[in-house]
Amino acid sequence: MPADPALQDKLIARFGLQAHPEGGYYRETHRDGARVAREGAGGVATHAASTAIYYLLCDRAYSAWHRIRADEVWHFYAGCPLHVHVLEADGSLTTHRLGDALADDSAVFQAVVKAGCWFAAERSDPDGFSLVGCTVAPGFEFGEFELADAARLQAAHPRHAALIARLAPAAAD
């Protein structure tokens, strides 16, 4: 069933979503006041213990290949199933089918992407929409968000080159 543009606009307005750099729309809904120390390239910094967002994929949007320095739990809310593709540390590919697990035996309500893994997501129905949530612990920081260089990622994972190319980050203007 094709997505209704009016419904998509209603979801964007209802949840106060804004464009996300990796594609789609999002809004942070929680940033934990508790702080945790985390060692990084610049030394030790403090982060929120956890963060959470709403995330909507609609129209032609997909979540381009990226990685973060923390585990990220994806939660399904509404719409069509979402395929979350993860390039594992050993080079294998795992695809989680995030969706209504009560109506679809091949779907799960939650999926975990481990810290440091490259991942991307796309709707199972390119004409549909997917409304999901993401929880990150320690909390998400844009300074630790890295969009992939598709050519480098393809060179590192040649057997997944076609999928990497299909979900590559948009070229910078």
Image (spheres, rainbow, N blue to C red):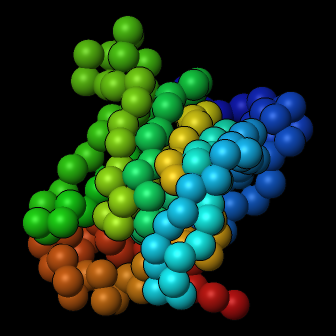
| Left/right of residue 107 with respect to residue 80 in the rendered view | left
Q: Quadrant of residue 160?
A: bottom left
Total labels: the figure holds 0
Residue lying farthest top? 102
In the image, residue 106 lies at what x, y percent? 25, 24
Residue 123 x/y as whole percent? 47, 43
Q: Position of residue 9 (x, y in %)?
A: 83, 39
Q: Is residue 127 left or right of residue 35?
A: left
Q: Quadrant of the N terminus?
A: top right
Point out residue 66 in the picture as x, y percentages from the top left corner: 45, 69
Residue nearest the viewer, comparing 50 with 153: 50
Quadrant of the drawing holding the C terminus: bottom right
* 94 or 129: nearer the viewer: 94
Residue 60 seen in render: no
- What residue is shown at x 75% (from left), y 59% (from top)? 19
Rendered residue at 73%/45% (across/down): 33
Q: Nearer the viewer, residue 37 or 19?
A: 37
Q: Which residue shows up at 56% across the image and 56% down it?
A: 36
Q: Up-down: is 112 above or below 138? A: above
Left or right: 79 as drawn, with respect to 29? left
Query: Residue at coordinates 15% horizontally, 79% vertically from top-left?
Result: 158
**Viewer-side residue, 145 vs 127:** 145
The image shows residue 153, relative to residue 144, as above or below, that is below
In this picture, is 105 found above or below 110? above
Q: Quadrant of residue 149?
A: bottom left
| For residue 76, side relative to residue 11 (left or right) | left
Say if residue 94 shows up in the picture.
yes
